[in-house]
Image: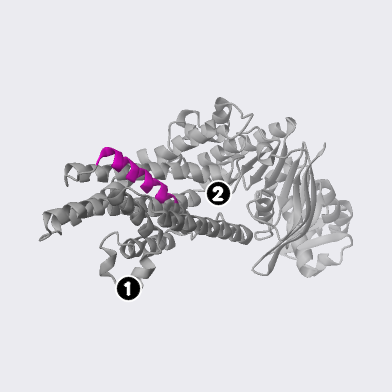
């Protein structure tokens, strides 16, 4: 793995409000990097700055080993291209024409899944089809680094499954993928590195396992009519949440927790132990930060 | 070069060939004005004065047609490219913005060429103007070069974003500019203060340039300098506003 992109001291304010502060990142090749955070955390602003669509107030973005970074990057933005009077085959060929070493037309058409619709105008496509086409267009130049901003929005479950299969293949072929998504469970299974952006700063940078080590690796769930105070005094609990009669407890030590709640087992039903998911960990992260 | 030609071909198809209703409207409006002011609203004018009026008004309507094509079509097309995210798509590809804008400008200049030829044809076949083909070709060429600042005004208006604002600005710019430049009625019938403003405008100077050449065969360098100055000012304004929008992060909203 080599360093492919360097992001140094990026700061950005909009109308006096800080959106990004002191962002420093090194992006290495052959990996999938997931950028996650709540709405308004600054994810899209960071991507727009990396891609030169917005200027930062300070800092520097450097694509290493190339003077022509647009030749080695592919981008799938949140918004679909929705031109009225251009056909699918025309936009694919137009996109290919900008690159020195484009993927073949047939390969891109196949990636878009629009083999039978190449003569259709783009505005005749469904939202999911437009999304697939955007993905294929992002690969026109056979990029080394791919930016995907909310790539699976509007795709049905089959299309999402196929999409992540393609992303997996791209990583195997040595591509670097920088992705944001609100479908956290999808990222959990595929990303090598997670960046949590919170209030404009990188709050966490590491693997899902290292995030679990901090945020707790086990989620114990059960239903009970008992008061939450019964459980809050148990040791080694990282967080506890009550939704009606449903309890969710995050811990690094599920065995100790089960022993601690044994005296109350008669008043507990539907007991389950799970691995903590990204959703829960992000929620905890946000709550901790808000309490700080 | 290949991708430039391909991009221009696609732009031509989507803006002209696949948008026929708009294309026809763009062509018909100045022709209708030309016929209205040379065939219907011209009673009591002596024949020799009418021949000069037909020629002068031909020039005015060629310029007016280029204003419609250069300002309204440009601003609406660029706005459409923004709302459909085509500008964003282009910005992320390894081509310069100059390539995108110049490719679009070629299509708009072509549209203006067609409308100029159509108005000249109306002048020749319906109003029987007595101008040589050579002179008409030179007038059309001068007109097309004079269109470039108008296309830049259209690009500038498109930065306003939102179809309501862009349409409002188009109306606020095109029709008053046509009137104070003396394209609809002779500028001498306007108050002095309005004449002074009108005579600074690039469309008045373009009209002046063409009419000087039409009647004397000489080049009006003062008009060329004025139009060039407008070109530089509008281009600088466009660059500055684009940079401000990029800094504010609103360029592709």
Residue A38 lies, in percent from the top left, at 68, 58
For the N terminus of chain B, the image quarter is top right
State the scheme by which the image is colored: one colour
In this view, the residue in front, B149 or A55, is B149
Report the magenta stretch's main SS.
Answer: helix
Residue A273 appears in the picture as rendered? no
| Residue B215 picture location, percent across and down | 28, 51
Chain containing the residue with disc 1: B
Residue A69 lies in the magenta stretch: no
Write down the region rendered in magenta: B132-148
Across and down, in percent, residue A107 comes to 58, 27
Residue indicated by mark 1: B192
Residue at numbered disc 2: A79
Residue extending farthest to the left is B44
Displayed quadrant of residue B37: bottom left
* Residue at x 41% of width, y 47% of height: B145
The image shows a total of numbered marks equal to: 2
Whether label 1 touches label 2, CB < 8 Å: no
Q: Quadrant of the C terminus of chain B?
A: bottom right
Q: Residue at x 68, y 68 (%)?
A: A17
Which secondary structure, mark 1?
helix
> In the picture shown, does residue B151 fall above or below A284?
above
Q: Secondary structure at mark 2?
A: loop
Residue drawn at point x = 26 percent, y = 48 percent: B28
Query: Alpha-carbon distance for marks 1 and 2?
Result: 52 Å
**x 64%, y 29%: residue:** A101
Residue B66 image label: none
Residue B61 as seen in the image, left or right of residue B240:
left
Q: Nearer the viewer, residue A245 or B150?
A: B150
Query: Are the residues flagged by discs 1 and 2 from a single subunit?
Result: no
Instruction: Determine crowd level at label 2: few under 14, some 14-19, many 20+ residues with C-alpha closer than 10 A.
Output: some
């Amino acid at each position: 793995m080599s360093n492919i992109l360097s992001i140094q001291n990026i700061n950005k304010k909009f109308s006096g409000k800080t959106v990004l502060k002191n962002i420093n990142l090194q992006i290495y090749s052959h990996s999938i990097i997931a950028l996650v955070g709540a709405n308004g955390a600054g994810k899209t602003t960071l991507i727009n700055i990396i891609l030169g669509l917005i200027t930062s107030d300070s800092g520097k973005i450097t694509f290493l080993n190339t003077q022509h970074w647009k030749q080695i990057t592919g981008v799938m933005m949140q918004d679909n291209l929705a031109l009225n009077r251009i056909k699918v085959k025309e936009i694919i060929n137009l996109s290919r024409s900008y690159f020195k070493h484009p993927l073949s037309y047939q390969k891109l058409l196949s990636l878009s899944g629009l083999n039978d619709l190449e003569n259709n105008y783009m505005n005749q496509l469904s939202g999911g089809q437009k999304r697939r086409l955007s993905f294929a267009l992002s690969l026109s130049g056979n990029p080394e680094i791919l930016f995907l901003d909310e790539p699976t929005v509007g795709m049905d479950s089959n299309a999402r499954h196929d999409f992540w299969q393609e992303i997996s293949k791209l990583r195997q072929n040595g591509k670097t993928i920088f992705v944001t998504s609100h479908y956290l469970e999808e990222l959990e299974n595929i990303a090598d590195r997670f960046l949590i952006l919170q209030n404009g700063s990188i709050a966490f940078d590491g693997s899902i396992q290292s995030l679990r080590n901090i945020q707790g690796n086990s989620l114990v769930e059960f239903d009970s009519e008992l008061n939450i105070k019964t459980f809050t005094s148990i040791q080694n609990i990282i967080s506890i949440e009550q939704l009606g009669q449903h309890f969710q407890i995050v811990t690094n030590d599920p065995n100790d927790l089960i022993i601690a709640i044994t005296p109350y087992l008669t008043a507990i039903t539907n007991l389950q132990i799970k691995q903590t998911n990204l959703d829960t960990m992000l929620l905890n992260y946000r709550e901790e930060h808000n309490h700080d | 070069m290949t991708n430039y030609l391909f991009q221009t071909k696609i732009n031509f198809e989507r803006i002209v060939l696949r948008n026929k209703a708009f294309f026809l409207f763009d062509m018909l409006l100045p022709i209708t004005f030309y016929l209205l002011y040379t065939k219907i609203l011209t009673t009591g004018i002596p024949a020799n004065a009418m021949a000069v009026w037909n020629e002068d008004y031909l020039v005015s309507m060629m310029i007016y047609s280029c204003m419609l094509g250069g300002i309204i079509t440009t601003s609406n097309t660029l706005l459409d490219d923004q709302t459909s995210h085509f500008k964003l798509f282009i910005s992320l590809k390894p081509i310069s913005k100059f390539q995108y804008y110049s490719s679009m400008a070629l299509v708009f200049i072509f549209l203006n060429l067609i409308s100029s030829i159509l108005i000249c044809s109306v002048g020749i076949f319906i109003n029987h103007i007595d101008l040589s083909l050579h002179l008409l070709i030179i007038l059309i060429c001068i007109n097309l070069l004079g269109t470039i600042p108008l296309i830049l005004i259209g690009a500038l208006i498109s930065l306003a974003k939102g179809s309501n604002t862009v349409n409002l600005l188009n109306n606020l710019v095109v029709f008053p500019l046509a009137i104070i430049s003396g394209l609809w009625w002779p500028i001498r019938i306007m108050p002095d203060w309005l004449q002074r403003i009108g005579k600074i405008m690039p469309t008045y100077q373009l009209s002046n340039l063409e009419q000087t050449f039409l009647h004397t065969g000489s080049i009006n360098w003062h008009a060329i300098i004025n139009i060039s100055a407008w070109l530089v000012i509008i281009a600088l304004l466009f660059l500055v506003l684009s940079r401000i929008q990029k800094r504010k992060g609103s360029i592709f909203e």
